[in-house]
Amino acid sequence: MNSKKIVIIGGVAGGASAAARARRISESAEITLFERGPHVSFANCGLPYFIGGEIAKSESLLLESPEVLSKRLHININILTEVISIDREARTVTARDRLTGGITHTPYDALLLSPGAKPVKPPIPGINLPGHFTLRNVPETIAVSEWIDTYSAKRAVVVGGGYIGLEMAEQLVRRGLNVTIVEAAPQVMGVVDYEMAGYLHRSLLAHGVAVHLNDSVVCFEEPDQTSDVMASVVVLKSGDRLPADVVVLGIGVRPESSLAKEAGLEIGSLGGIRVDSHLRTSDPHIWAVGDAIEVKNGVTGEWQLIPLAGPANRQGRIAADNMLGANRTYSGTLGTGILRLFDLTVACTGATERSLLRLGIPHETVHLHPNSHAGYYPGAKALAIKILFKAVTGELLGAQIVGQDGVDKRIDVLAAALRAGLTVHDVADMELAYAPPFGSAKDPVNIAGMIAENILDGYIDTVQWHEIAGLDLEKTILLDVRQPGELEEGKIPGSVNIPLSELRDRLSDIPRDKQIVAYCRSGQRSYSACRILMQHGFDCKNLSGAFLTWSAASDSF
Amino acid sequence: MNSKKIVIIGGVAGGASAAARARRISESAEITLFERGPHVSFANCGLPYFIGGEIAKSESLLLESPEVLSKRLHININILTEVISIDREARTVTARDRLTGGITHTPYDALLLSPGAKPVKPPIPGINLPGHFTLRNVPETIAVSEWIDTYSAKRAVVVGGGYIGLEMAEQLVRRGLNVTIVEAAPQVMGVVDYEMAGYLHRSLLAHGVAVHLNDSVVCFEEPDQTSDVMASVVVLKSGDRLPADVVVLGIGVRPESSLAKEAGLEIGSLGGIRVDSHLRTSDPHIWAVGDAIEVKNGVTGEWQLIPLAGPANRQGRIAADNMLGANRTYSGTLGTGILRLFDLTVACTGATERSLLRLGIPHETVHLHPNSHAGYYPGAKALAIKILFKAVTGELLGAQIVGQDGVDKRIDVLAAALRAGLTVHDVADMELAYAPPFGSAKDPVNIAGMIAENILDGYIDTVQWHEIAGLDLEKTILLDVRQPGELEEGKIPGSVNIPLSELRDRLSDIPRDKQIVAYCRSGQRSYSACRILMQHGFDCKNLSGAFLTWSAASDSF
């Protein structure tokens, strides 16, 4: 039997997974777990839903008590205990009991670092005023909730429009607060491209959330005694002043790598612990997982920080095996993520167009708007799908989806395809489950692949939404092929309307010496229009995603 | 420009897809489509939902009128016109107008056969009595609906428990009828294995549907004039007599291959048109797609009839390209399918255990019962997942899922994995989208892969539900590791209860000279129990899927 001494620092996603796996693999290993906080194995990703009341009891967030976990796994769990140093030569960790101050030294054969990440708190004046919160653990979450009750908070300012910021905005609205988001970037949800975030901007507005983009906090002004402001007046760079009864900081997180750094372990350029493909640090007896490490992006090969629960959990399992002598490989992270925002869901996997442009990776882009299931069956909702793929080979590079229904399914299928190294041809041919309540005979994922194939096969050339503004309308006809009644929804300035149904009869209305860019509502009819025009000798391109994509990106905000 | 003469026989899924694709690829091709029925491009898969009223208007089932489709695609559409012969030498088809009887001869350069399949109607006495229906097209569907209204039908007998039979049973219940299903096999939904069909049997019972398994119709007896029976008395082999006001035949379909056969094209052993990997028949100028052809099973390589809309649509597109000179390959069919039955969804992809056993393909089987999303977030429902994979390599062979939520997503991910040739290791490592409303940090699909890995890595050996009945309890301990309170749900006869939480302290209660088979509710805790016992020298196996799978298969019915 393997009586290895395993020490694990951090008892949430990666650490708890590793502990459980290690015990199942080895009944005889001596497993010791240190957790700085009061809880192990809590539902980190569920915290915002407690604030909004969707998860009614804070106990639901505590998946297992230290006592139960300790007994079930037969491991030594030390909560409220902080590891303060690692002696790599002696292979011991020194820990301090946060209640008693008592110091212990624990030897290890294999050490796992799973310390997580801490919320970024920039040195903005007033950031530590009462009523200003981050959302890292259950006590902090309860504190936000109690503050809202105690001070009858009505106005919330959420700083940062990423996963946590948006989830908190949604839940604070659910709780009846007026919510304002402040985001320094030109868009929320930086893990998707600008035009895809456009749908979220609309949804936030529609649900009464004020959004300040391209703006940032200069200071949190302490409210004067006579005011009814409970937390601070949030002063923005733009000069806007936002009275806030509660402030939630969702600016991002930073890897908890100081202990590793002090121990002399290699730290990456992004500040995360550097590990090899076996999740081993620069010390052969120390492994690291979760939010604290840098991971290789599965598409671009770049080092990245991807603080998500899924990778942390799977890494914990792999690291446990490797600590017990296996040689398992972690294959990198795609950054597959998902967020519900009111009635919308947004999800992504792999590279964004932004990152591909930054890295100079040549790619093609397809936007489409298929129904979530067969249109003739009630309840179908349009999806906005974007896929990115390599020219020539058609290898998938990334995908983003926004919609009301079926988003999670399609992103998971595309994430599976991405992991398998599939091409858009494979994606077009995938055999997915179809019955009217669930999909279409050609699933949205198939259609994405088919459109991409049409580009690779030279059947169509496309123009992207961001190229429209730069078109020279002296040399270009912007051809709207929708039915006239549809123009009430809006149109792209400068466009000319010839419905697809009349196109074959009106070819002589279209000048042959100009570049034509066709669009309809979703891009499907304008593709047919392009095919007709191209075969009649016109130089015609299709606007990818057509009016729906263009307008999502172009709505003034 | 390509002015090829293309003739297409059959205007629904495959034929309509092919016509549309061919036109987009070639504006100059002469495309002629013959359809025997009154409609093209109708929603075949939606027919049952009109009966139940979920799709309120029969017009919703008619996706495009022949006139609109004809104008939009600039093709010659002949409805109510039956092609009666193919002159392969002259390359012409002879068609008869079903209204006028007029005969036409149409030349082709490329011919596509997409005639579909016709419902099986065995020569059972009385099968053609009034009130006995198949459900092949919109007029037949309307006829069923009108019959129910006209005769105030209260009792329906559905013959056959496959896709159509079950969808019809659900919809007839929705319409307020008392429904009985008669199925010759020991289970409904023959595309999944017996124990997975067990969940459907329960659901049918719970929704008041009577199910006669292992039974078949001897005759449909004409009701005597004094009786209130509107359709027939359905007499079963068992002797049971079922009064029926309406009878729906969902016995299966048979490829419409007679035209192809008469033309001397190669027909497969299952009666379908035989095509090569480019969907070309034994005549180089003739292609065939859809329900009428035999396809190679993507897992087993067997020829199969898989009459589903998804493959038909994708085949139509590929055949269109090939008729116009491309050389595209159809990669086979996995039989990915899905069905909603009341509150359950059942789905499958790839090979069943039954087919693997029949073909003698060595395989491993895993059952699991994970939550559809994080358990701490409201609304999570248990899924029953079964995966089949090759020993040693771990290559995925098939999957089946039953549950109330998230079934379609997981089957699509597994279908994608199967198409990509992934192993259970890949499946364990897949990075799927996680937020509490959508999944878990370890998605059910990941967990399926992880359990399979544990088998391949030798961490666990399993026993399947069907082996339990044959266990010699003199030599075997059937160890139930659930908490005592859980035994109220039922237990496997002969089992001994030692809760997992007490196991380490009660090792001496367990004889060391017997084989131990452990189970809990889902198989997760009994896996932990096995790991503990194995490492303490016991010979222990885990019951795959544990009590939930065993009881689904064992409920007397």
Image: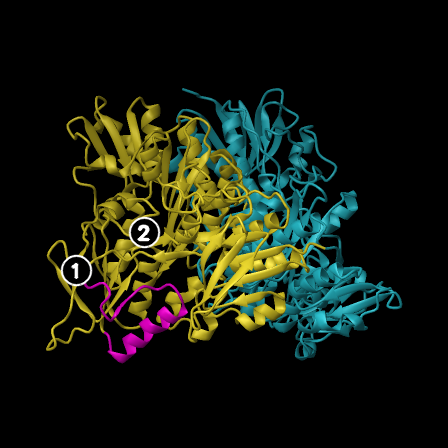
Chain colours: A cyan, B yellow
Relative to B112, residue A326 above or below: above
Q: Is residue A150 visible?
A: no
The vertical placement of B477 against A355, above or below, is above
- State whether residue B69 appears in this view: yes
Q: Residue A554: x percent and y percent?
A: 75, 67
> Which range is magenta?
B125-153
Circle 2 sits on which residue?
B189
A320 left or right, relative to A295: left
User: Where the N terminus of chain B falls, by quadrant?
Assistant: bottom right
Q: Residue at x 48, y 40 (%)?
A: B418
Going by the image, does A226 lie left or right of B541? right
Q: Secondary structure at mark 2?
A: loop
Q: Amino acid at mark 2?
A: Met
Camera-side residue: A534 or B495? A534
Q: Residues within 10 Å of mark 2 (few under 14, many from 20)?
A: many
Please name the residue shown 61% across and 22% down the image: A284
